[in-house]
Image: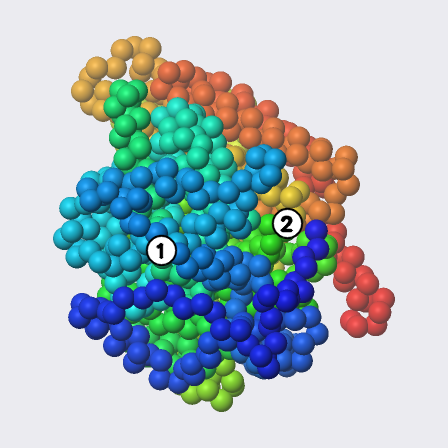
Amino acid sequence: MRLDFTPRPRFSISLCSPRLPLPLLRRPSNASAAPARAEVSRLRLERSEVPARAPRRLEAGRAGACVIHARRSWAPEVMEVLIGDPITTCLSPSVYDIICNLGFQLRENCDINSIVTQNGEVCWKTITDCVSYTESDQGLDYWGSVRLLGPVCEAVHSHFLSLTKGQFEIRYAPWFQWTSFPELFPEIFDALESLQSPAISLSLMKLTSCLEQALGDVFLLIGKECPFLLRDLLASEELAQVFGQSVMNVLKVFVGSPCGLNLRNVLWHGFASPEEVPPKYCSMMMLLTAGLGQLLKSYLQKTKLTLAHRSFITPTNLEDLIVFPDVTYEVLSVLEEAMTKSAFILKIMLPYWEVALVKFKSHRFADCAILLLTQLETGLRNVFATLNRCPQRLLTAESTALYTTFDEILAKHLNDGKINQLPLFLGEPAMEFLWDFLNHQEGPRIRDHLSHGEINLHEFSKETTNQLLAFSVVLLLRFVDEGLLSVFKEKASVELLISLAEGYSSRCHPVFQLKKQVLSCEESIRVWALLPFPKELIWEAVRLEDNSETNACHSLITKMMDELYHHMPEDHCVLKDLDHLPTETWPQLLRELCSTPVRTLFCPRIVLEVLVVLRSIGKQCHRVSGQVTIASELRHRQWVERTLRSRQRQNYLRMWSSIRLLSPVLSLILFLITLELVNVHAVCGKNAHEYQQYLKFVKSILQYTENLVAYTSYEKNKWNETINLTHTVLLKIWTFSEKKQMLIHLAKKSTSKVLMKTYKSGCL
């Protein structure tokens, strides 16, 4: 759908006759907020105050829009972004109107005693009566509801500001216990008392994420699978059954629909500047949360149910993502200056960056990360809109269209199928970093988990925030003039960050995870050589091993390893002119092969499908290795303790014989799947029939490894059968290899074609 961004008469964006926004209710600050305010003020050395006027928005074709000049083929280090008139809002006209104006239109006073009692009990009827419905009563009248709820929110805000912190905690603290983060609400109370607009926005973001997690817990009292999106959660019959439909409609007005205030999405996606978030809505959301706690208590008493909180999650693979060193004071000082000079930051959003820095220094790492993530999205959306010549995409969308969020900003294509220019501008390293932290299923997906309330904010790691902050420094420096950049790069710590950022490669993509898996498995197999075995049984085991099928397997393994070695990338072929590849070199070659770069950004689906199978093979190999180690240690202990029965003794001998075969065959399979991984993009050159044949081949290897897992398990202990299985699969691999249909062969053909074309064109 197309969006209509034409300014309405009631909301003029003329620069000649600006319309002043209605003032927001504030309370004079107390002394406890002074140090934080002083720190923020110190950071605003070169910030020019934005005049209070109707917001200026990017318009298609406007001369003052952001212009990006690239030199030397868009090399990142010589980029500079020139911005004309500063943008004063990222809210579209109707969204600005509903958030900043509509709730202030009615000036009537609302009696606080009709909203909340002296004991802190919420009078829901007063609130629900303000919700308007369409004429047909089939839906909510969001605009009418916001207008009527305005005075209620005003009264609630004034009420909270009239309380001391002690009074607030006595009246309301018990009603926040139903959430998994009740200690958040006294912090929000402190934020309401301060004059820091960014603190209000941050409080609302944390409140909505906490509320979403708590409502999900309530949903699971009745339902089975909690909806992923807050709007779907609020629309569920389960929550209506607990709290009542009229109460859920109130929540929809505030956080559940793009037709309403939609505070959660507008803030978490970085659209609202600090001055555009009325504090009274934060106060109202806090009262609503307390009221929900009261309703829930009644429901639990009536139904005799017990509310259980889901455990917080621990983001995955964080240890792989630690690439930048700890941010030093020198780097922080560079960031302080870069924030005021970098065109990446919209001036209206600068206070968020300043507070993020304060939060980092005060070890509030989750708060810092939340602010950084939302502002990275804001800045990248600005660059995205400029590069793709769609400046209107900087604004919040209406209810008829989706917002421009990270999902689209970091995608390969735009919604219309055109190539997204942002990845070309940022370069693969920066894109890989963003995908790792935000998108990859096996990555930490920090923003998702934070925004849905799934992470314990008090236990949020410094290391994670450190990585985001270091990346932000490098990104901001991409948008300062070259003279200033050269000054910053004279600092060794800054030069190091830039170097590390430029060399970044994905740590959460399936390609990296497969390499990690292969190396771990290879290390596990190497341990087999150290497994103890009774000397008095060695000759008996060797005689058992000396049979035609085992010898045939060893012969095939040697033959195939020699063949596969010829497909190693040329810069890794360190052993030249060898008729036979020594087994002691296999681990070294595998490690070198795993160091070969493989493209990971925007992998085609067909490549990802192959990676799934290759990773499954690697996983099964690792399971076999673990089972072999456990079984061998168990049998040896039983031998030493003289508890092995006759049949178990024979099984021990067969196991040792099998291990001597499984070690090289698993090494061969690891070498094979890693070579295929290095050439995985060649699969795109196969037609449908060839692809199905290839998939059938790799799945046959997977089937073999799955059978090995079964046969080497403690329950089955079928060591003799593994030899027959191994011989069969080795013959399959050799036969398929002879057809030249593996990816290593296809990649070689592609290289040969390129060389032939180059030769014919006279370039060689």
Write the residue at 31% across / 66% down: 26
Q: Locate residue 32 relative to residue 109 in the image: left or right.
A: left
Instruction: Using the image, determine if residue 437 lies above or below residue 532.
Output: below
Q: Earlier in the sequence, mark 2 or mark 1?
A: 1
Percent across and percent down for residue 135 are: 60, 39
Q: Secondary structure at mark 2?
A: loop
Q: For this rendering, which residue is in front, 225 or 742? A: 225
Q: Assess whether mark 1 and mark 2 are in contact (beta carbons under 8 angstroms).
A: no
Examine the rendering and report whether any part of residue 183 can be seen: yes
Residue at the limit of the structure toward the front, as seen here: 108
Write the residue at 76% across / 60% down: 754
Mark 1: few, some, or many residues within 10 Å (few <14, many ≥20)? few
Q: Quadrant of residue 736?
A: top right
Q: For this rendering, which residue is in front, 247 or 135? A: 135
Percent across and percent down for residue 539 are: 35, 25
Percent across and percent down for residue 651 are: 36, 16
Q: Locate residue 152 relative to residue 69 in the image: left or right.
A: left
Mark number, residue 384: none
Residue at the limit of the structure toward the right, as seen here: 760
Instruction: Using the image, determine if residue 544 lies above or below residue 735.
Output: above
- Residue at the spot of label 2: 400
Write the residue at 29% across / 80% down: 42
Q: For this rendering, which residue is in front, 485 or 42? A: 42
- Residue at the spot of label 1: 109
Query: What amino acid is labelled 2 in the image?
Result: Thr
Q: Locate residue 477 relative to residue 643 in the image: left or right.
A: right
Write the residue at 45% across / 67% down: 22
Percent across and percent down for residue 429 are: 52, 64
The type of colouring in the image is rainbow
